[in-house]
Image (cartoon, helix red, strand yellow):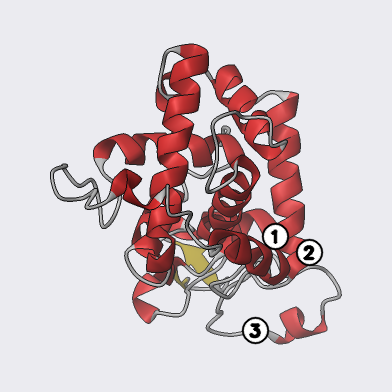
Amino acid sequence: MNKHDAARRAFLVRAAAGAGAVAGAGLVPGAFAETQEQAKEAVPSSAAPMHANVHANREIQGAFFNHADAATMAAFVERIMPGAPGKPGARDADVLNYIDLALSGAYSDLQEFYRQGLAQLGVYCGAKYKKQFAQLSAAQQDEVLTALDEGKATGFAWPTAQAFFNTVRTHTMEGMFADPIYGGNKDFAGWELVGFPGAQMFYSPKDMESKEAFSRAPIMGLQTGLTKISMGPSNGPARKG
């Protein structure tokens, strides 16, 4: 992992820990509200037909994304939250699945926002690199993300480049750190990054008296079927293989 990747990861981890809301669906309420407002701006009449009936004649990858869009989004979120040996990233935490499920459910009102954003991203990458985003090198993908973040990517009308980037970044953070019941944070990867204990079956007297940060790994989310750790024979919870 290069210094740029490490700095990006560190920023998102600090934001997640500082938000104090990793147990809920919305990780960063302030940022979430801001990007949701941007995403819900009225669709320009000239943009609406661009992807009308977009699902009619295409092969679906998951609940919402087709194969091409899924590949783009997988690469996009991984560059926002890159993985490294021993440090899970967006791909490890299954952030793509989180966003895919959200867009087919709670965030269904953002479907056109994502369609338009991905289409404009494809045009921008095609014009600048003659390739699609998923086919670019990591360095080139970072160049694209920087251009989006700074509003310098050309060809974006609705959503704007910044609005699209900010929304995907917020949803990436949600997919990394929200409760696994929503389809992301696979194996509690995000919670372990920020030291969030999740739901615990018990707290020992020693845990209650300690002034140190609680360090035992998460054992479950909102759903008991997501249990990750079982009770060990003598030293409390023991990790399953």
Q: Quadrant of residue 89?
A: top right
For disc 2, the marked residue is: 18
Q: CA distance from mark 2 to mark 3?
A: 24 Å
Q: Quadrant of the C terminus?
A: bottom left
Check disc 3 and report its element: helix, strand or loop.
Answer: loop
Q: Is residue 42 visible?
A: yes
Q: Are marks 2 and 3 in contact (CB under 8 Å)?
A: no
Residue at 58 percent of width and 65 percent of height = 36
For disc 1, the marked residue is: 16
Q: Closer to the N terminus: mark 2 or mark 3?
A: 2
Q: Work out whether residue 8 or residue 157 is closer to the camera in this orientation and state it.
A: 157
Q: Work out whether residue 218 or residue 235 is closer to the camera in this orientation and state it.
A: 218
Classify residue 2 as left or right of residue 98. Answer: right
> Could you say where residue 48 lies in the image, as x and y percent from the top left?
38, 52
Classify residue 168 as left or right of residue 95. Answer: right
Q: Are marks 2 and 1 in contact (CB under 8 Å)?
A: yes
Q: Quadrant of residue 143?
A: top right
Q: Quadrant of the N terminus?
A: top right
Q: Is residue 81 visible?
A: no
> Could you say where residue 55 lies in the image, as x and y percent from the top left?
20, 50
For disc 3, the marked residue is: 203
In the picture as drawn, the residue positioned furthest to the right comes out as: 211
Mark 2 surroundings within 10 Å by alpha-carbon count, few (fewer than 14), some (14 through 19), many (20 or more): few
Check disc 1 and report its element: helix, strand or loop.
Answer: helix
> Could you say where residue 133 lies in the image, as x and y percent from the top left?
45, 26
Question: Could you tell me the amino acid type at mark 1?
Answer: Ala
Q: CA distance from mark 3 to mark 1?
A: 24 Å
Residue at 52 percent of width and 47 percent of height = 158
Question: Could you tell me the amino acid type at mark 2?
Answer: Gly
Question: Could you tell me the amino acid type at mark 3?
Answer: Tyr
Check disc 2 and report its element: helix, strand or loop.
Answer: helix
In the picture as drawn, the residue positioned furthest to the top comes out as: 130
